[in-house]
Amino acid sequence: MPVKHENYTFLTSWSDVYVDEYERTSSAMSDYHAHRYYEVSLILSGEVGVSSESERPRVILCAPGVPHYITCTKGTAYKRINVVFSEEFISSSREAEEIMGVFKREGNVIFLDNEQANELADIARSIMKENNRFRQRLLLLYYISKISDSDVDTVKDGLPDYISRVLCYIKEKYSEKIIANDLARYVNVGRTTLMTAFKKHTGMTVGEYVLKCRLIAAVDLLSAEVPVRECAERCGFGESCNFIRSFKRHFGMTPRKYMSIMKNCRKNVSSA
């Protein structure tokens, strides 16, 4: 089954490995998230990332399930190449085990000089252009091995421990009723302190973050062709009408329309 891009509004389905390159001026970004695939973000220019040393080219690596926090100031011009790949695609290679340690437990950032950044960009573009699955894997292994040759620094996300605990709690309990006072008691801080810090570090209120978690879970279920009513119940929306209204407001289409688009995407991938 194709893996889905974390940004579900792109409606991008892919299998094995996916590369995209883009240069744009960003709206404000502040998003603490995780996904089920490996992600290598090569930041070629612009103040985007997880470090104050953000003017230098760098590569940000995140393994499946690793929460990471990427920020971008509104109006920032930046250029990046994202390489994402499934765990199954890389784990089938015996050579991978030695070099995959570069991702580390909490993610990593590697700072680069311009020559290193340009070399990695060329390899990433080669992966994007290659249609042969075997050669794609070889190029991907080469890409990661070149990254692992550089010095690696552990990512520091700067989040207070109680915010990290709340984020993990919400990701596990999003389908249940979540009350701010209960969260504050759970992490032993005042409600106002929690709400203020949560907004500062995630760019969202608790309610907005819970909604996002529910919608992401719903997208997974819809992609697996789970009925709309069941999605609403399993993701904490209650009535189907609440789910449909929230989904349409966020994605600009109904859940059924989304299911139809994803089904077509899968057909295109399987026939490619």
Image (spheres, rainbow, N blue to C red):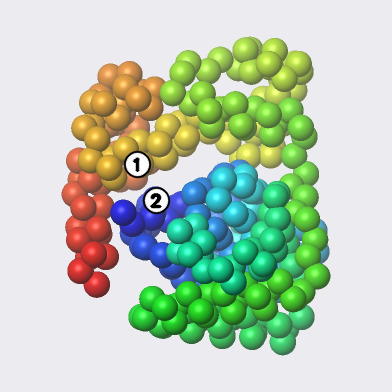
In the image, is 197 to the left or to the right of 229?
A: right
In the structure shown, which secondary structural element does the residue marked by tag 2 occupy? Answer: helix
Label 1 packing within 10 angstroms: few (<14), some (14-19), many (20+): many
Instruction: Report the amino acid beneath label 2.
Output: Tyr
From what the image shows, is residue 63 above or below residue 117? Answer: above
Q: Position of residue 106 (x, y in %)?
A: 70, 49
Check the picture and name the quadrant holding the C terminus.
bottom left
Q: How many marks?
A: 2
Q: Position of residue 224 (x, y in %)?
A: 27, 42
From what the image shows, is residue 178 above or below residue 78? Answer: above
Instruction: Report the amino acid beneath label 1.
Output: Val
Asked if residue 60 can be seen in this view, the reply is no
CA separation, marks 2 and 1?
8 Å
In the image, is 152 to the left or to the right of 32?
A: right
User: Is disc 2 in contact with disc 1, using a CB cutoff of under 8 Å?
Assistant: yes
Q: Quadrant of residue 153?
A: bottom right
In the structure shown, which secondary structural element does the residue marked by tag 1 occupy? Answer: helix
**Residue topped by disc 1:** 219
**Residue drawn at (54%, 32%) of the image:** 171
Q: Position of residue 137 (x, y in %)?
A: 48, 75
**Residue drawn at (20%, 61%) of the image:** 267
Q: Quadrant of residue 67?
A: top right
**In the foreground, 105 or 155:** 105
**Residue topped by disc 2:** 8
